[in-house]
Image (cartoon, grey):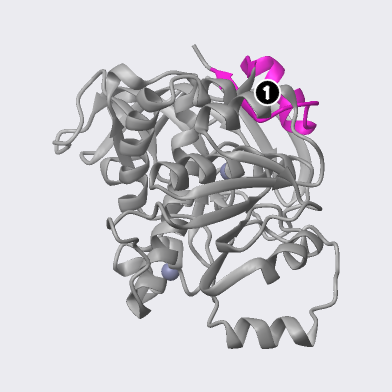
Amino acid sequence: MRAIVIHPPNPGVSLRELSDINLSNIGDDEVAVRTLYTGICGTDRELANGLMRHSVPPPGKDFMVLGHEVIGEVIDVGEKVTGFKRGDKVVALVRRGCGNCLSCRLGRPDLCETGEMKIAGIKAQDGFMADLFVDKESYLVRVPDNVVSEDAVLIQPMGDVVKAIRTFLSIVEARFPWGCEDSTYECRSAAIIGSGSTGLLFSILLKSMGFNVVVLNRRAPTRLEERIVGEIGVDFRLISEDVGQIDLLVDTSGSTVSISRVISKVKPKGGVILFGFGIGDETRVSSQLITDIVYKNIVIVGSAAHAKIHLREAVSYYARLKIEYPSVFKGMVTNIATPDSAVQYVSKKQEGEIKVVVRWR
Ligand SMILES: [Zn+2]
Ligand SMILES: [Zn+2]
């Protein structure tokens, strides 16, 4: 079978022919899946270019199959598998617990305390950019057949976004209600820094929960971005413009310069979700900013990865939002690759790219 392989922590990515999976050998609790689509994200690019120094191949191997955003079709199930049957469409969980810490033992490898968890396609576990893969039933979530298309690879990153929003709301609402008089969030405003696929996923989810959303970037929107935010019904503004007072700031850029520009706009009792990894621009945190955060009772939440419950919720959101906003997810898929051309897409980001999908069949 074909697979896109990398050699972490060293650079290098190639399409390789691996020996086929012997389907008569799959375990009782395992499911064999034929890959339909895989998404390419910035993490894949960092891995391929040798920029993720903490990554390692699976034990005993000198390469790792890349890819963590996947949609596949079940082609065989082990004897004890009850939740899946041949033909089911599935998305796979990426984090696999370390088995030692309390979080992992309680089904929350996204909150692993030891850092020894495995991450499919990212650290010590093969990913999904291959014709076939076999996984335990417990690591798969079913996606309704009739909603699956190339853009369903967005379900995996949407799991991260769902978790970030759920975590933030559960923390902030444990202190004081955040809902409006009609119980929705329609009186709340959110500003999102970054208009990449993650920024757009935050926009559509927060908008669907009732938030008034504005997307911020250092540059003007492309025609495609303009069309997408228009359909979602959110504004796009330059970060240098005045955004007014906001209840929630979400950063997907990792830019300290951008964050420090907007964070002072967060209202009393408001909050900040930090989602983007730092990109290396340094800025000074002013003493006044610290005083503001304290005085205004601002909640700041960092969030990465997700658990199975969030992936399930992401599937529901995806199915619903695809009906509500018919061309948003489709519009976010800017490039379709073949396994052959995927290597080039993994190596280098394309002009105007939002999401690249590799079609395996
Ligand atoms: Zn990713
Ligand atoms: Zn753990």
Asked if ligand 1 lies within 8 A of label 1, the reply is no
Label 1 neighbour load within 10 Å: few <14, some 14-19, many 20+: some
Give yes or no for residue 346 being in the magenta stretch.
Answer: yes
| Span highlighted in magenta in the image | 336-359
**In front of the other: 340 or 253:** 253
Q: Is residue 3 above or below residue 209?
A: above
Q: How many marks?
A: 1
Q: Which of 358 and 314 is in front in this view?
A: 314
**Where 339 falls versus 355 (above or below)?**
above
Q: 235 or 360, which is in the foreground?
A: 235
Residue that appears at 28% across and 55% down: 182
* Nearer to us in this view, 351 or 131: 351
Q: Residue at x 20, y 39 (%)?
A: 28
Residue under the point 78% across and 51% down = 241
Give the image location of residue 230, x and y in percent: 58, 28
- Residue at the top extreme, as displayed: 361
Where is residue 211 drawn, in percent x and y?
A: 45, 50
Reply yes or no: does residue 79 show up in magenta. Answer: no
**Is residue 277 among the parts visible in the rendering?**
yes
- In the shown orientation, is residue 279 left or right of residue 152? right
The three-letter code of the residue at mark 1 reads: Leu
SS assignment at label 1: helix
In the displayed structure, 312 sits above or below 260; it is: above
Q: Where is residue 132 in the image (x, y as percent from the top left)?
A: 44, 24
Q: Residue at x 32, y 54 (%)?
A: 184
Q: Where is residue 140 in the image (x, y as percent from the top left)?
A: 32, 39
- Residue at the spot of label 1: 224
Ligand 1 resides in the quarter of the picture at top right
Q: Which picture quadrant has residue 2?
A: top right
